[in-house]
């Protein structure tokens, strides 16, 4: 039963996030993605919420595998 509840919560959360991201990234999306709240989004954090790797490649301008504050500001507002 606990597994079913976990799966249901995961599915509902995933659907809600998918709907939000379908409308485009925004700073609320950033808050959700930044799991450790360090102000940067790692590729791993990003991939938990999006499979749009073309957007990631475009936003990660210095190709270090992380989105810093400037890349987030520019990338998420232009997506």
Image (cartoon, helix red, strand yellow):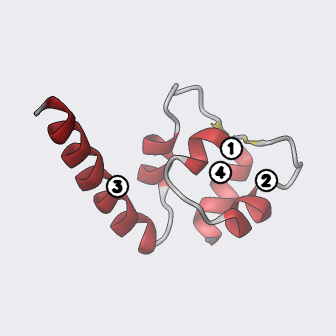
The reply to whether callout 2 and callout 1 are in contact (CB within 8 Å) is: yes
Q: Which label was assigned to residue 43?
A: 1
The reply to whether callout 3 and callout 1 are in contact (CB within 8 Å) is: no
Name the residue tied to disc 3.
14
**Is disc 3 placed on a helix, strand or loop?**
helix
**Which of pointers 2 and 3 indicates the residue nearer the eye?**
3
| Measured Cα–Cα span from mark 3 to mark 1 | 18 Å
| Measured Cα–Cα span from mark 2 to mark 3 | 24 Å
In the foreground, 60 or 27:
60
Q: Residue at x 49, y 52 (%)?
A: 49
| Measured Cα–Cα span from mark 2 to mark 1 | 9 Å
Q: Which residue is drawn at 29% across and 59% down?
A: 16
Work out whether mark 4 precedes mark 2 in sequence or the reverse, and give the earlier one. 2
Q: Position of residue 57 (x, y in %)?
A: 78, 61
In the image, taking residue 13 as reference, residue 25 lies left or right, namely: right
Name the residue tied to disc 4.
72
The reply to whether callout 2 and callout 3 are in contact (CB within 8 Å) is: no
| Measured Cα–Cα span from mark 1 to mark 4 | 12 Å
Q: Where is residue 2 in the image (x, y as percent from the top left)?
A: 15, 30
**Is disc 1 placed on a helix, strand or loop?**
helix
Name the residue tied to disc 2.
60
In the foreground, 53 or 35:
53
Residue 42 visible in the displayed image: no
In the image, taking residue 39 as reference, residue 69 lies left or right, namely: right
Work out whether mark 2 precedes mark 3 in sequence or the reverse, and give the earlier one. 3
Work out whether mark 1 precedes mark 4 in sequence or the reverse, and give the earlier one. 1
In the foreground, 55 or 51:
51
**Is disc 4 placed on a helix, strand or loop?**
helix
Q: The C terminus lies in which quarter of the figure?
A: bottom right
Q: Which residue lies furthest to the left in this view?
A: 1
């Amino acid at each position: 039963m606990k597994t079913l509840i976990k799966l249901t919560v995961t599915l509902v959360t995933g659907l809600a996030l998918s709907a939000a991201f379908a409308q485009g990234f925004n700073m609320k999306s950033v808050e959700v993605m930044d799991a450790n709240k360090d102000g940067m989004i790692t590729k791993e954090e990003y991939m938990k919420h999006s499979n749009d790797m073309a957007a990631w490649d475009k936003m990660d301008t210095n190709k270090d595998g992380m989105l810093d504050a400037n890349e987030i500001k520019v990338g998420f507002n232009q997506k």
